[in-house]
Image (cartoon, rainbow, N blue to C red):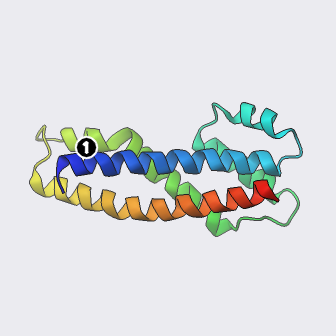
Amino acid sequence: MTFQEFKILHSEIISYFQSIEYNLKRMYSVMSSEDFDDEMDMLETSNMGNTISMLKKLDHSDGKPWLSDTDYEELEHIRKIRNYWVHQCYIDYFYNKRRLVKGDEFVRMANKLSNEHDRIYNLCKKIEAICIDWIEN
């Protein structure tokens, strides 16, 4: 993988994370008994971790959660992966103890990005479909 291809995959995975985060906010707003637009406004500055926590609490409030504990564990895992790719990967790429990442380390990071890119893309589409179904019904 070239550095240019790496940057494209990195940009795409960030867009998937943003879509997941936004759709979680939409799911919370639909589940809430409050006004959808007011709820979305309230969540505008909420980070992904807070949104997941609030969604889980609301989802479990009636004793019949729509998402399973496993789903919430996966979302929490995705949040951590997101934080790495958003906040840390370029620091790891450009800097380490030797100051610049060398070929083998770049290949390892590029393979990790490629694998996670495909997995996150699939999850993004799944959450998007759920969100569309909720809003239309």
- The image quadrant of residue 42 is top right
Name the residue beneath numbered marker 1: 92
Q: Nearer the viewer, residue 96 or 40?
A: 40
Quadrant for the N terminus in the image? bottom left
Residue 135 on image: x %, y %: 77, 53
Residue extending furthest toward the front: 136
Is residue 84 placed above or below 115 in the rendered structure?
above
Which SS class for mark 1? helix
Residue 88 shown left or right of residue 83 in the figure? left
Q: Is residue 51 visible?
A: yes
Percent x, y of residue 67? 71, 65
Mark 1 is surrounded, within 10 Å at the Cα level, by few (under 14), some (14 to 19) or many (20 or more) other residues, namely some
Image position of 112 (left or right of 132)? left
Query: Looking at the picture, which amino acid does disc 1 mark?
Result: Asp
Determine if residue 72 is in view. Answer: no
Q: Quadrant of the C terminus?
A: bottom right
Residue 50 falls left or right of residue 39: left
Asked if 112 appears above or below 2 in the picture, the reply is below
Residue positioned 40% across, 49% down in the render: 12
Foreground: 89 or 132?
Answer: 132
